[in-house]
Amino acid sequence: MSLIDKNLIAAHNDRLLRHVNNDYAHLGEQLARRGIDIEAVRAKVAAFGVAIPSWGVGTGGTRFARFPGRGEPRNVFDKLEDCGVIQQLSRATPTVSLHIPWDTCSDWSELRQAAASHGLAFDAINSNTFSDQKGQAHSYKFGSLTHGDAATRAQAVAHNIECIEIGQKLGSKALTVWIGDGANFPGQQHFRRAFDRYLESAQQIYAALPGDWRMMLEHKICEPAFYATVIQDWGSSFMAASALGPKAQCLVDLGHHAPNVNIEMIVARLIAAGKLAGFHFNDSKYGDDDLDAGSVAPYRLFLVFNELVAAAHEGVSGFDPAYMLDQSHNVTDPIESLMTSAAQVQRTYAQALIVDRAALDAAQDANDALVATQCLKRGFDTDVTPILQRVRFDAGGAIDLVGAYRASGYRQRVAEARPAVAGGGGGIV
Ligand code: AOS
Ligand code: ZN
Ligand code: ZN
Ligand code: ZN
Protein backbone atom coordinates (compact mmCIF):
# COMPACT_ATOMS: atom_id res chain seq x y z
CA MET A 1 0.00 0.00 0.00
CA SER A 2 1.57 3.30 -0.93
CA LEU A 3 0.64 6.36 1.05
CA ILE A 4 1.92 8.84 -1.52
CA ASP A 5 0.89 8.42 -5.15
CA LYS A 6 3.77 6.79 -7.01
CA ASN A 7 2.95 8.74 -10.17
CA LEU A 8 3.34 11.98 -8.28
CA ILE A 9 6.80 10.93 -7.08
CA ALA A 10 7.73 9.81 -10.59
CA ALA A 11 6.56 13.10 -12.14
CA HIS A 12 8.48 15.05 -9.54
CA ASN A 13 11.61 12.98 -10.10
CA ASP A 14 11.36 13.26 -13.91
CA ARG A 15 11.89 16.98 -13.79
CA LEU A 16 15.06 16.65 -11.72
CA LEU A 17 16.66 13.44 -12.93
CA ARG A 18 18.72 14.90 -15.80
CA HIS A 19 20.42 17.36 -13.45
CA VAL A 20 20.96 14.70 -10.80
CA ASN A 21 22.62 12.43 -13.34
CA ASN A 22 24.90 15.22 -14.54
CA ASP A 23 25.82 16.18 -10.99
CA TYR A 24 26.40 12.54 -10.07
CA ALA A 25 28.71 12.00 -13.07
CA HIS A 26 30.65 15.13 -12.20
CA LEU A 27 31.02 14.12 -8.54
CA GLY A 28 32.05 10.63 -9.67
CA GLU A 29 34.85 12.20 -11.72
CA GLN A 30 36.03 14.35 -8.83
CA LEU A 31 36.05 11.40 -6.45
CA ALA A 32 37.82 9.18 -8.98
CA ARG A 33 40.64 11.74 -9.09
CA ARG A 34 40.93 11.17 -5.33
CA GLY A 35 40.98 7.41 -5.84
CA ILE A 36 37.43 6.92 -4.56
CA ASP A 37 34.85 4.80 -6.37
CA ILE A 38 31.51 6.62 -6.19
CA GLU A 39 29.61 3.37 -6.82
CA ALA A 40 31.09 1.79 -3.71
CA VAL A 41 30.05 4.82 -1.65
CA ARG A 42 26.58 4.73 -3.18
CA ALA A 43 26.12 1.05 -2.29
CA LYS A 44 27.05 1.68 1.34
CA VAL A 45 24.77 4.69 1.62
CA ALA A 46 21.92 2.69 0.06
CA ALA A 47 22.34 -0.01 2.71
CA PHE A 48 22.23 2.51 5.56
CA GLY A 49 19.09 3.07 7.62
CA VAL A 50 18.11 5.10 10.66
CA ALA A 51 15.08 4.31 12.83
CA ILE A 52 12.21 6.73 13.41
CA PRO A 53 11.00 7.12 17.00
CA SER A 54 7.22 6.77 17.10
CA TRP A 55 7.01 9.84 19.38
CA GLY A 56 8.87 11.92 16.79
CA VAL A 57 5.95 12.12 14.35
CA GLY A 58 3.85 14.05 16.87
CA THR A 59 4.61 17.72 17.46
CA GLY A 60 6.92 18.16 20.41
CA GLY A 61 6.90 20.88 23.00
CA THR A 62 8.54 22.22 26.10
CA ARG A 63 7.39 22.38 29.69
CA PHE A 64 6.00 25.81 28.84
CA ALA A 65 3.73 24.93 25.96
CA ARG A 66 3.01 22.72 23.03
CA PHE A 67 1.60 23.99 19.77
CA PRO A 68 0.11 21.02 17.94
CA GLY A 69 0.33 20.84 14.18
CA ARG A 70 -2.46 19.88 11.83
CA GLY A 71 -3.35 16.26 11.34
CA GLU A 72 -1.37 14.95 14.30
CA PRO A 73 -1.39 11.15 14.64
CA ARG A 74 -4.18 10.00 16.97
CA ASN A 75 -2.75 6.57 17.76
CA VAL A 76 0.04 4.19 16.95
CA PHE A 77 -1.53 3.22 13.60
CA ASP A 78 -1.54 6.87 12.50
CA LYS A 79 2.06 7.16 13.67
CA LEU A 80 2.98 4.19 11.50
CA GLU A 81 1.33 5.84 8.51
CA ASP A 82 3.41 8.96 9.00
CA CYS A 83 6.53 6.80 9.37
CA GLY A 84 5.46 5.02 6.17
CA VAL A 85 5.42 8.35 4.32
CA ILE A 86 8.88 9.21 5.66
CA GLN A 87 10.19 5.86 4.47
CA GLN A 88 8.40 5.95 1.12
CA LEU A 89 9.96 9.29 0.20
CA SER A 90 13.34 9.07 1.96
CA ARG A 91 14.12 5.34 1.67
CA ALA A 92 16.45 5.80 4.63
CA THR A 93 14.14 4.94 7.54
CA PRO A 94 13.04 1.28 7.28
CA THR A 95 12.34 0.82 11.00
CA VAL A 96 10.27 2.36 13.78
CA SER A 97 11.11 2.43 17.47
CA LEU A 98 8.06 2.17 19.73
CA HIS A 99 7.56 3.61 23.17
CA ILE A 100 5.53 1.81 25.79
CA PRO A 101 2.98 2.82 27.05
CA TRP A 102 2.69 5.83 24.71
CA ASP A 103 2.04 3.32 21.93
CA THR A 104 -0.85 1.21 23.07
CA CYS A 105 -2.46 -1.49 21.01
CA SER A 106 -4.86 -4.33 21.68
CA ASP A 107 -3.45 -6.59 18.97
CA TRP A 108 0.29 -6.44 18.37
CA SER A 109 0.17 -8.80 15.40
CA GLU A 110 -2.22 -6.40 13.67
CA LEU A 111 0.30 -3.63 14.32
CA ARG A 112 3.10 -5.72 12.91
CA GLN A 113 1.06 -6.31 9.77
CA ALA A 114 0.22 -2.62 9.46
CA ALA A 115 3.93 -1.80 9.69
CA ALA A 116 4.79 -4.39 7.04
CA SER A 117 2.13 -2.96 4.72
CA HIS A 118 4.02 0.36 4.86
CA GLY A 119 7.36 -1.39 4.30
CA LEU A 120 8.38 -0.94 7.92
CA ALA A 121 9.81 -3.18 10.66
CA PHE A 122 10.43 -2.49 14.34
CA ASP A 123 13.67 -1.40 15.93
CA ALA A 124 14.44 -1.18 19.67
CA ILE A 125 11.52 -0.91 22.05
CA ASN A 126 11.61 1.89 24.65
CA SER A 127 10.33 1.55 28.19
CA ASN A 128 8.97 4.45 30.22
CA THR A 129 9.45 4.67 33.97
CA PHE A 130 10.01 8.42 33.94
CA SER A 131 6.31 9.27 34.18
CA ASP A 132 3.40 7.74 36.03
CA GLN A 133 0.81 5.86 34.03
CA LYS A 134 -2.89 5.70 34.79
CA GLY A 135 -3.74 3.15 37.41
CA GLN A 136 -0.21 2.19 38.41
CA ALA A 137 0.22 1.31 42.07
CA HIS A 138 3.47 3.14 42.83
CA SER A 139 4.66 6.58 41.72
CA TYR A 140 7.99 7.27 40.02
CA LYS A 141 8.21 10.76 41.48
CA PHE A 142 11.30 9.72 43.46
CA GLY A 143 12.67 7.18 41.05
CA SER A 144 11.92 3.91 39.34
CA LEU A 145 14.62 1.26 38.90
CA THR A 146 16.61 2.97 41.66
CA HIS A 147 13.74 3.87 43.99
CA GLY A 148 14.30 3.25 47.70
CA ASP A 149 11.10 1.25 47.88
CA ALA A 150 11.37 -2.35 46.67
CA ALA A 151 7.77 -2.51 45.40
CA THR A 152 8.29 0.54 43.19
CA ARG A 153 11.45 -0.98 41.78
CA ALA A 154 9.63 -4.26 41.15
CA GLN A 155 6.90 -2.40 39.25
CA ALA A 156 9.53 -0.69 37.07
CA VAL A 157 11.29 -4.00 36.42
CA ALA A 158 7.97 -5.66 35.49
CA HIS A 159 7.22 -2.85 33.03
CA ASN A 160 10.56 -3.36 31.29
CA ILE A 161 9.95 -7.10 31.07
CA GLU A 162 6.54 -6.42 29.57
CA CYS A 163 8.25 -4.20 26.99
CA ILE A 164 10.51 -7.11 26.05
CA GLU A 165 7.46 -9.34 25.61
CA ILE A 166 5.74 -6.78 23.37
CA GLY A 167 8.97 -6.30 21.44
CA GLN A 168 9.17 -10.04 20.79
CA LYS A 169 5.72 -9.95 19.22
CA LEU A 170 6.88 -7.14 16.95
CA GLY A 171 10.23 -8.55 15.90
CA SER A 172 12.33 -6.07 17.91
CA LYS A 173 15.75 -7.18 19.05
CA ALA A 174 16.58 -4.59 21.67
CA LEU A 175 15.25 -2.81 24.73
CA THR A 176 16.34 0.78 25.32
CA VAL A 177 16.27 1.85 28.94
CA TRP A 178 16.44 5.50 29.84
CA ILE A 179 15.46 6.45 33.39
CA GLY A 180 14.89 9.92 34.80
CA ASP A 181 16.00 8.77 38.27
CA GLY A 182 18.28 11.05 40.23
CA ALA A 183 18.26 13.94 42.65
CA ASN A 184 17.35 17.60 42.60
CA PHE A 185 19.24 18.49 45.77
CA PRO A 186 22.66 17.69 47.14
CA GLY A 187 22.15 15.18 49.89
CA GLN A 188 18.83 13.96 48.51
CA GLN A 189 20.24 10.66 47.35
CA HIS A 190 22.97 8.27 48.45
CA PHE A 191 24.84 8.02 45.15
CA ARG A 192 26.37 4.58 45.64
CA ARG A 193 23.26 2.97 47.04
CA ALA A 194 21.11 4.36 44.21
CA PHE A 195 23.55 2.94 41.67
CA ASP A 196 23.56 -0.43 43.44
CA ARG A 197 19.77 -0.50 43.30
CA TYR A 198 19.97 0.31 39.58
CA LEU A 199 22.25 -2.66 39.02
CA GLU A 200 20.02 -4.98 41.00
CA SER A 201 16.92 -3.93 39.03
CA ALA A 202 18.71 -3.91 35.68
CA GLN A 203 19.99 -7.44 36.36
CA GLN A 204 16.42 -8.70 36.63
CA ILE A 205 15.55 -7.10 33.29
CA TYR A 206 18.73 -8.44 31.75
CA ALA A 207 17.82 -11.94 32.92
CA ALA A 208 14.57 -11.70 30.94
CA LEU A 209 16.31 -10.77 27.66
CA PRO A 210 16.01 -13.32 24.85
CA GLY A 211 19.36 -14.70 23.68
CA ASP A 212 19.57 -12.57 20.55
CA TRP A 213 18.51 -9.31 22.23
CA ARG A 214 20.50 -6.33 23.42
CA MET A 215 19.80 -4.04 26.36
CA MET A 216 20.79 -0.48 25.49
CA LEU A 217 21.50 1.77 28.45
CA GLU A 218 20.99 5.46 27.67
CA HIS A 219 22.82 7.95 29.86
CA LYS A 220 21.85 11.58 30.35
CA ILE A 221 23.64 14.25 32.31
CA CYS A 222 20.53 15.86 33.80
CA GLU A 223 16.79 16.40 33.48
CA PRO A 224 14.38 15.75 35.04
CA ALA A 225 16.81 15.32 37.95
CA PHE A 226 18.72 18.60 37.76
CA TYR A 227 21.38 18.00 40.38
CA ALA A 228 22.45 14.41 39.74
CA THR A 229 21.24 11.64 37.48
CA VAL A 230 21.92 8.00 38.37
CA ILE A 231 23.10 7.04 34.87
CA GLN A 232 24.52 10.45 34.17
CA ASP A 233 27.41 9.78 31.80
CA TRP A 234 29.10 7.14 29.72
CA GLY A 235 31.23 6.12 32.70
CA SER A 236 28.20 5.14 34.78
CA SER A 237 26.60 3.56 31.73
CA PHE A 238 29.76 1.60 31.00
CA MET A 239 30.04 0.40 34.60
CA ALA A 240 26.45 -0.81 34.49
CA ALA A 241 26.77 -2.43 31.05
CA SER A 242 29.97 -4.18 32.13
CA ALA A 243 28.37 -5.48 35.33
CA LEU A 244 25.32 -6.75 33.46
CA GLY A 245 27.09 -8.72 30.74
CA PRO A 246 27.73 -8.87 27.01
CA LYS A 247 24.14 -8.19 25.93
CA ALA A 248 24.17 -4.81 27.70
CA GLN A 249 25.71 -1.88 25.86
CA CYS A 250 25.80 1.91 26.07
CA LEU A 251 23.59 4.11 23.93
CA VAL A 252 24.79 7.59 23.04
CA ASP A 253 22.16 10.30 22.66
CA LEU A 254 24.09 13.25 21.26
CA GLY A 255 22.18 15.75 23.42
CA HIS A 256 22.90 14.08 26.73
CA HIS A 257 26.34 15.49 27.50
CA ALA A 258 27.77 18.61 29.05
CA PRO A 259 28.55 21.38 26.56
CA ASN A 260 31.85 20.91 24.72
CA VAL A 261 32.25 17.29 25.74
CA ASN A 262 34.17 15.39 23.07
CA ILE A 263 31.42 12.96 22.07
CA GLU A 264 33.36 11.38 19.21
CA MET A 265 35.99 10.34 21.70
CA ILE A 266 33.39 8.72 23.95
CA VAL A 267 32.22 6.86 20.87
CA ALA A 268 35.76 5.70 20.17
CA ARG A 269 36.17 4.44 23.74
CA LEU A 270 32.89 2.53 23.65
CA ILE A 271 33.83 0.96 20.32
CA ALA A 272 37.18 -0.11 21.75
CA ALA A 273 35.41 -1.74 24.70
CA GLY A 274 32.84 -3.48 22.49
CA LYS A 275 30.12 -1.56 24.33
CA LEU A 276 28.68 0.84 21.75
CA ALA A 277 24.96 0.04 21.48
CA GLY A 278 24.06 2.83 19.10
CA PHE A 279 22.78 6.36 18.84
CA HIS A 280 19.95 8.74 19.33
CA PHE A 281 20.74 11.45 16.78
CA ASN A 282 19.72 15.05 17.31
CA ASP A 283 21.51 18.37 17.64
CA SER A 284 21.86 20.90 20.40
CA LYS A 285 23.26 24.26 21.34
CA TYR A 286 22.73 24.29 25.09
CA GLY A 287 21.68 20.90 26.42
CA ASP A 288 19.23 18.19 25.49
CA ASP A 289 17.67 20.55 22.95
CA ASP A 290 16.55 17.75 20.64
CA LEU A 291 17.05 19.94 17.56
CA ASP A 292 17.15 18.36 14.11
CA ALA A 293 20.28 16.27 13.47
CA GLY A 294 23.10 18.34 12.00
CA SER A 295 21.15 21.60 12.16
CA VAL A 296 23.59 23.35 14.50
CA ALA A 297 26.86 21.41 14.56
CA PRO A 298 27.15 19.24 11.44
CA TYR A 299 30.91 18.89 11.86
CA ARG A 300 30.45 17.32 15.28
CA LEU A 301 28.10 14.78 13.72
CA PHE A 302 30.70 14.18 11.02
CA LEU A 303 33.41 13.51 13.60
CA VAL A 304 31.16 10.90 15.22
CA PHE A 305 30.65 9.23 11.85
CA ASN A 306 34.35 9.40 11.19
CA GLU A 307 34.84 7.12 14.22
CA LEU A 308 32.10 4.76 12.99
CA VAL A 309 33.45 4.50 9.47
CA ALA A 310 36.99 4.00 10.78
CA ALA A 311 35.79 1.14 13.02
CA ALA A 312 33.97 -0.54 10.13
CA HIS A 313 36.96 0.02 7.84
CA GLU A 314 39.30 -1.56 10.37
CA GLY A 315 36.93 -4.49 10.92
CA VAL A 316 36.47 -4.02 14.68
CA SER A 317 34.78 -7.23 15.78
CA GLY A 318 31.23 -7.05 17.14
CA PHE A 319 30.82 -3.47 15.87
CA ASP A 320 27.12 -3.11 15.02
CA PRO A 321 25.58 0.13 16.28
CA ALA A 322 21.85 0.86 16.09
CA TYR A 323 20.85 4.22 14.64
CA MET A 324 17.81 6.24 15.60
CA LEU A 325 16.66 9.86 15.49
CA ASP A 326 15.49 11.30 18.82
CA GLN A 327 14.31 14.84 18.23
CA SER A 328 11.53 17.15 19.30
CA HIS A 329 9.82 18.98 16.44
CA ASN A 330 8.19 22.02 17.91
CA VAL A 331 7.95 24.42 14.97
CA THR A 332 8.12 22.20 11.87
CA ASP A 333 6.00 19.51 10.30
CA PRO A 334 7.56 16.43 12.00
CA ILE A 335 7.48 14.47 8.74
CA GLU A 336 9.58 17.14 7.02
CA SER A 337 12.01 17.31 9.93
CA LEU A 338 12.41 13.54 10.13
CA MET A 339 12.91 13.10 6.38
CA THR A 340 15.51 15.84 6.17
CA SER A 341 17.22 14.66 9.36
CA ALA A 342 17.47 11.11 8.02
CA ALA A 343 19.01 12.54 4.86
CA GLN A 344 21.39 14.61 6.97
CA VAL A 345 22.56 11.48 8.81
CA GLN A 346 22.98 9.69 5.47
CA ARG A 347 24.90 12.69 4.12
CA THR A 348 27.24 12.67 7.09
CA TYR A 349 27.84 8.96 6.67
CA ALA A 350 28.71 9.50 2.99
CA GLN A 351 31.10 12.34 3.86
CA ALA A 352 32.88 10.11 6.37
CA LEU A 353 33.04 7.28 3.82
CA ILE A 354 35.04 9.42 1.40
CA VAL A 355 37.76 10.29 3.90
CA ASP A 356 41.05 8.90 2.59
CA ARG A 357 41.85 6.51 5.46
CA ALA A 358 45.31 5.58 4.17
CA ALA A 359 46.31 9.23 3.85
CA LEU A 360 44.93 9.92 7.32
CA ASP A 361 46.90 7.02 8.83
CA ALA A 362 50.06 8.23 7.10
CA ALA A 363 49.57 11.80 8.33
CA GLN A 364 49.04 10.57 11.87
CA ASP A 365 52.15 8.39 11.69
CA ALA A 366 54.16 11.35 10.43
CA ASN A 367 52.73 13.66 13.12
CA ASP A 368 51.48 15.90 10.33
CA ALA A 369 48.59 17.50 12.16
CA LEU A 370 47.67 19.87 9.35
CA VAL A 371 47.39 17.23 6.63
CA ALA A 372 45.58 14.89 9.02
CA THR A 373 42.91 17.42 9.79
CA GLN A 374 42.65 18.33 6.10
CA CYS A 375 41.91 14.68 5.32
CA LEU A 376 38.81 15.01 7.47
CA LYS A 377 37.85 18.43 6.13
CA ARG A 378 38.07 17.19 2.56
CA GLY A 379 35.42 14.60 3.31
CA PHE A 380 33.23 17.05 5.19
CA ASP A 381 33.57 19.76 2.53
CA THR A 382 32.44 17.49 -0.28
CA ASP A 383 28.87 18.02 -1.43
CA VAL A 384 27.57 14.46 -1.61
CA THR A 385 24.00 15.51 -2.47
CA PRO A 386 24.00 13.74 -5.86
CA ILE A 387 24.80 10.43 -4.14
CA LEU A 388 21.86 10.82 -1.77
CA GLN A 389 19.55 11.83 -4.59
CA ARG A 390 20.55 8.85 -6.70
CA VAL A 391 20.15 6.46 -3.78
CA ARG A 392 16.64 7.74 -3.17
CA PHE A 393 15.72 7.68 -6.84
CA ASP A 394 17.04 4.16 -7.36
CA ALA A 395 14.98 2.90 -4.41
CA GLY A 396 11.76 4.54 -5.61
CA GLY A 397 11.94 7.54 -3.27
CA ALA A 398 11.81 11.25 -3.97
CA ILE A 399 14.80 13.21 -5.25
CA ASP A 400 13.40 16.36 -3.67
CA LEU A 401 12.05 15.21 -0.31
CA VAL A 402 10.21 18.27 0.92
CA GLY A 403 9.07 19.35 -2.54
CA ALA A 404 7.46 16.00 -3.30
CA TYR A 405 5.96 15.74 0.17
CA ARG A 406 4.36 19.17 -0.02
CA ALA A 407 3.08 18.52 -3.53
CA SER A 408 1.45 15.30 -2.32
CA GLY A 409 -0.91 17.17 0.02
CA TYR A 410 -0.52 14.37 2.60
CA ARG A 411 -0.72 16.67 5.61
CA GLN A 412 -3.90 18.35 4.34
CA ARG A 413 -5.41 14.95 3.66
CA VAL A 414 -4.75 13.55 7.12
CA ALA A 415 -5.79 16.83 8.73
CA GLU A 416 -9.30 16.16 7.44
CA ALA A 417 -9.40 12.65 8.88
CA ARG A 418 -7.63 13.42 12.15
CA PRO A 419 -9.37 15.99 14.34
CA ALA A 420 -7.34 18.86 15.74
CA VAL A 421 -6.05 18.39 19.27
CA ALA A 422 -5.80 21.11 21.88
CA GLY A 423 -2.43 22.69 22.68
CA GLY A 424 -1.48 23.90 26.10
CA GLY A 425 1.29 23.50 28.59
CA GLY A 426 3.68 20.68 29.24
CA GLY A 427 4.93 18.90 26.18
CA ILE A 428 6.95 15.78 25.69
CA VAL A 429 10.66 16.11 25.12
C1 AOS B 1 15.36 11.46 27.09
O1 AOS B 1 15.84 12.59 27.18
C2 AOS B 1 15.83 10.49 26.16
O2 AOS B 1 16.43 11.11 25.06
C3 AOS B 1 15.11 9.21 25.84
O3 AOS B 1 15.59 8.65 24.67
C4 AOS B 1 13.65 9.19 25.87
O4 AOS B 1 13.22 7.91 26.09
C5 AOS B 1 13.00 9.69 24.61
O5 AOS B 1 13.22 11.05 24.49
C6 AOS B 1 11.52 9.42 24.53
O6 AOS B 1 10.94 9.31 25.71
ZN1 ZN C 1 17.26 9.69 23.58
ZN1 ZN D 1 17.20 13.23 25.31
ZN1 ZN E 1 15.03 14.75 25.11
Image (cartoon, rainbow, N blue to C red):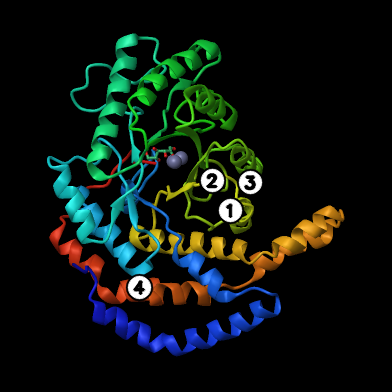
Question: What distance separates the C-alpha of mark 4 from that of mark 3?
Answer: 31 Å
Question: What distance separates the C-alpha of mark 2 from that of mark 1?
Answer: 7 Å
Q: Could you tell me residue 279's position as x and y percent?
A: 49, 45
Q: Circle 3 sits on which residue?
A: 264
Q: Residue at x 66, y 66 (%)?
A: 379
Q: Is residue 354 above or below residue 325?
A: below
Q: Could you tell me residue 129's position as x and y percent?
A: 34, 27
Question: What distance separates the C-alpha of mark 3 from that of mark 2?
Answer: 15 Å
Whether residue 24 is visible, yes or no, is yes
The quadrant the C terminus occupies is top left
Q: Earlier in the sequence, mark 1 or mark 3?
A: 3
Check disc 1 and give the amino acid type.
Ala
Q: Circle 4 sits on which residue?
A: 397
Q: Earlier in the sequence, mark 4 or mark 3?
A: 3
Q: Circle 2 sits on which residue?
A: 319
Label for residue 312? Answer: 1
Q: Earlier in the sequence, mark 2 or mark 1?
A: 1
Q: Residue at x 33, y 63 (%)?
A: 87
Check disc 2 and give the amino acid type.
Phe
Whether residue 421 is visible, yes or no, is no
Q: Is residue 377 above or below residue 285?
A: below
Check disc 3 and give the amino acid type.
Glu
